[in-house]
Image: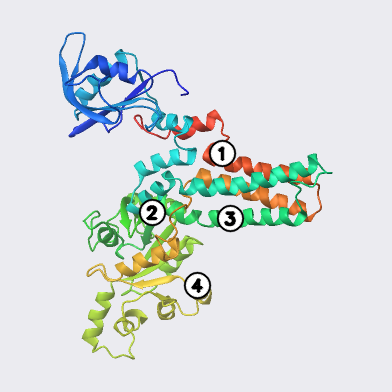
Amino acid sequence: MLYNDTIAAVSTPYGSGGIGIVRISGDKAFEIAEKIFKGKRSVKEMKSHTINYGKIIDDLDGSVLDEVLLTKMEKPNTFTREDVVEINCHGGIIVLKKVLELVTRHGARLAGPGEFTKRAFLNGRIDLAQAEAVIDIINAKTALSSKAALAQLEGALSEKIKEIRDELVELVAHVESTLDFPEEDFDKITGESLYKGMEKAREELSGLLSKFDKGKVIMEGVNAVIIGRPNVGKSSLLNRLTGRNRAIVTDIPGTTRDTIEEYINMGGIPLNIIDTAGIRETSDLVEKIGAEKTMKAIESADLVIMMIDTGEGFTPADAAILQLIGEKKKIIMLNKIDLVEKQEDLKGANPNSRGLNGLRDSRLEGNELIDNKLSELIDGKIKGNGELKGMIQGAGIAVIKSSMKDGRGMEELEKEISRLFMEGEIEAGIEGIMTNVRHASLVEKALNSVNDAISAYHANITLDCIAIDIRNAVNYLGEITGENISDEILERIFSRFCIGK
């Protein structure tokens, strides 16, 4: 027990609902509950981890505040490893507020953000990485991100970190015993065993770090921006992705004047999708401001989905927009393919003919994701633009033929996003994957320290210097699980939590 005071808070969201819970944790939890709860059995008479029906009574005037179910949990078999009482009230704001005020009047203080979880960590119930997983579970945007956070809460990442850390601690111990007792044979480390140990740690740390990009996508999602010239189908794509008419769609260019953001779950990947104003030369002030916001959205994007009107072909304006994207991950959607097919039907659909503005008959090639097909459009509209054509072909940019009218291309879009950010295997190896930026930063620092130790070994630098680098790696890994962590960092971590957690 690291605290002498007892804390209390509403642990469910405030607002109208069926149930609201007031949680009390600390040495006085049972004493406080005994004073305010009246049931068939007193709190003292209740066994641990049982529930009792009764009423919360204001002792000042004897009034009944609520009919409740009270749960009693004795330490150490609780989340905080302290005595805990949970009062299940009706979920109204006023009721919860009055019950909480009564609890604090009898000796509890209001808990700070994340203080219950902080006590669970400080009392040894969970380590720091597991504590951080609690907020990740609360903030999870998809079933996949919830699964990853739950695996972390259950200790999958912690076990791996501790395993690597223990191996490095063992190396340091052998090095230091070799230095302290040079004439003794026991526990002496050889150069070969030292090198093998460091190499193993390097491989394991590199493996953890290599999966972080995938973990970050699972937890934080992808910022995806839809761009293109006016009236190419950007808002129609947003509506298709969200499954509702989120954006206004008309035949009038420039309808979208501002960016529109929506969150969606695309096959387990959280996607923050942003519909932007069309980019074109215009004298309209509002449209110009919208275009400027589009440029800012592109700068912060993880993925750019560029839409092209297939009927008009790949225009110089499209070429300019594509160059603005730069090295960002991108997908090109050749939209309105249904209109091209309609035109081809009117022409008799000669397989050797060219479609509108140089597009080949799209029906012959099926509706599949194809690389480098954009070159056909470039041939038709921008003769001799070898630099742009080479960029498309060399980069392997995915090109998807689509129709927002009938939904063609949507399945291919989901598959390509999965390929770009998850290597196509969304759920593979999710247990033990890193999803936290703080953890990744510390693993990277630990890896750098191990690399420094290996470099020092190859340079024949003394064992005591090598031991310093290995010890640094040990300390960095200890910060992840909380073996060595400053109060300032602890406060920063738990300040992200809501009150009651």
Left or right side of 480 for 176: right
Mark 2 to mark 3 CA distance (whole Å): 46 Å
Mark 2 to mark 4 CA distance (whole Å): 23 Å
Locate residue 474, reporting x and y percent: 63, 43
Amino acid type at circle 2 is: Ala
Amino acid type at circle 1 is: Glu
Mark 1 and mark 3 in contact (Cβ < 8 Å)?
no
Locate residue 415, reporting x and y percent: 36, 67
Q: Earlier in the sequence, mark 4 or mark 1?
A: 4
Locate residue 323, reporting x and y percent: 48, 64
Q: Earlier in the sequence, mark 3 or mark 1?
A: 3
What crowding class fits label 4: few (fewer than 14 Cα within 10 Å), some (14-19), or many (20 or more)?
Answer: some
What residue is disc 2 on? Answer: 291
Residue 438 visible (yes or no): yes
Residue 204: mark in rendering: 3
What residue is disc 4 on? Answer: 388
Could you say whether the residue bearing mark 1 is in a helix, strand or loop? helix
Task: Between residue 439 and residue 203, name the one nearer to us.
Answer: 203
From the viewer's perspective, is residue 485 above or below residue 222? above
State which quarter of the image contains the C terminus: top left
Amino acid type at circle 3 is: Glu
Residue 308 visible (yes or no): no
What residue is disc 1 on? Answer: 479
What crowding class fits label 2: few (fewer than 14 Cα within 10 Å), some (14-19), or many (20 or more)?
Answer: many
